[in-house]
Amino acid sequence: MDVKVKAQDLLSYEGDSLVVNLFEGVKQPGGATGAVDKALSGAIVAAIRRQEFSGKLHERLLLHTFSRLPVLQVLVIGLGKQGEFGVDRIRSASAEALRRLRQAGARRVGSVVHGAGAGGIDATQASAAVTEGALLGLYRFGKYRRATEDGERGLQQLTLLERDRNKIGSLEEGVRLGRILAEATIFARDMVNEPANALTPSELAGRAKKMAGGLGVAFKTLERAEMKRLGMGALLGVAQGSEHPPKLIVVTYRGARGKGRGLRLGLVGKGITFDSGGISIKPSEGMEAMKGDMAGGAAVLAAIKGIAELRLPVNVTAVVPATENLPSGTAQRPGDIVKTMNGKTIEVINTDAEGRLILADALCYACDAGVTHLVDVATLTGACVVALGSVRTGAFTNNRDLMRRVREASEISGEKLWELPLDDEYSEQIKSDYADMKNVGGRKAGAITAAKFLANFVGKTPWVHLDIAGTSQAEKEQGYQPKGATGAMVRTLITLAMGFAGSKQA
């Protein structure tokens, strides 16, 4: 969908539909909504008096204009209580409004920039949020369907209307930023929604290569022989059950100028393109969702795409260990011991705890590549879903400053997270009688012991681990999150890089 800004009074907009808004509890709308109400002979106020509309968050009032305006319909979207209003509500309101208009058959829509008026939000931030919400909320993965559901037509154009010509440049910059953030997220969503027979480790590497080539950034993959030479026994152990060869995908963006090495941000993402659990096989119910066990890998690849498109003055390396986890005559067994790239050994107690194994070698590789700050993203543990559900991503760290930066980026992006502890006592649960550690620590504190395991492979590098097991998929459509893949943490990672790019601190 095309999103553009136009210096125009919204009452003169000629298209299919017009979007305005209202805060909860407002009885007499002012501003743009008031002007539309007047043009419609008080239809909005009448609906409020009849208690058909109150402005609650995401509440929608669709009115036909009967030629009193150049558009066929006006949609009023509720913004909720004004005291609770923020940028993320702009995203969700934009998404909810446009999905309703798509359902109504609209193809060209004009809209106010939610929040840029009475909401008190900066114009660039507001237009970015409207754009993000629109593109993310209208997302559908229809690649394998012959027709759109219910015969819905696609919405083709969104025009943000602003009378003040002095604001147009700021609004256009917001649209550019919002589009890059949304399209990066959609890039990740598309990969996570792909079936595992289509998105193999080789195909994931191929998409990363095509993306890198289009952006002019460095790309390489390490094959099985190179992994063996480097001592990546944990990654190779997981991969040995599948006929599809593993790939270690490495994409490097160099945006910082100067000869000094400076800050180098490393992003590592779990890339299990299908997870059956291996010999420790999962129950069959719901196993089809395990095509999305590479959501962390998709997130870091999508993030570097957005970072490169924004041309941020920062150096970033994304590393994705990609493989399947399948049972076969060659599969890894419970009780096997593998050696990682940094020489530490792991007793494999449960082959379904494979994500931490492949991440161990990938984290070692990123550290050896010289990154100064490290964030990994993984659909790692069911225990994190039990703890936080699908609302917040679990976060763990060995560095307060980096955690602060990641938290601030998540708040800006609207992707909620919650930090969990990494006390030394948790290491007791992953001690092994036969190796340096074991890959599971029992039922207690499962998300924490998994993170504690990963901490063995980052050394002293400032590091944050993000467990997106609960947030990578949405069970139902809400706001700008569709049912299915969410693209969790893509916008947070890009925003983190933007923060580093604008900071003098390495």
Image (spheres, rainbow, N blue to C red):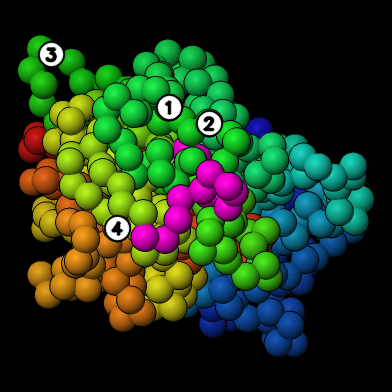
Viewer-side residue, 314 vs 318: 318
Q: Which mark is residue 258?
A: 3
Q: Residues within 10 Å of mark 4 (few under 14, many from 20)?
A: many
Give the SS element for disc 1.
Answer: helix
Identity of the residue drawn at 55% across and 34% down: 201
Helix, strand or loop at mark 2:
loop
Residue that appears at 60% across and 36% down: 243
Residue 245's label in the rendered image is: 2
- For the residue marked with disc 2, what is the amino acid? Pro
Q: CA distance from mark 4 to mark 3?
A: 45 Å
Above or below for 475 versus 35: below
Q: Position of residue 58 (x, y in %)?
A: 61, 70
- Magenta stretch, main secondary structure class: loop
> In the drawing, what numbered circle is on residue 224?
1
Q: Is residue 147 left or right of residue 239?
A: right
The tag earlier along the polypeptide, 3 or 2, is 2
Q: Residues within 10 Å of mark 3 (few under 14, many from 20)?
A: few
Q: Is residue 486 above or below residue 340?
A: below
Name the residue type under label 4: Glu
User: Which of pointers 1 and 3 indicates the residue nearer the eye?
Assistant: 1
Q: Which residues are magenta?
A: 322-335
- Mark 4 or mark 1, whichever is nearer to me: 4
Task: Say whether residue 363 is magenta.
Answer: no
Tag 1 near tag 2, CB within 8 Å: yes
The count of marks equals 4
Q: Residue at x 33, y 76 (%)?
A: 442
Q: Earlier in the sequence, mark 4 or mark 1?
A: 1
Task: Give the CA distance from mark 3 to mark 2.
Answer: 38 Å
Tell me the CA gap for discs 2 and 4. Answer: 23 Å
Mark drawn on residue 347: 4
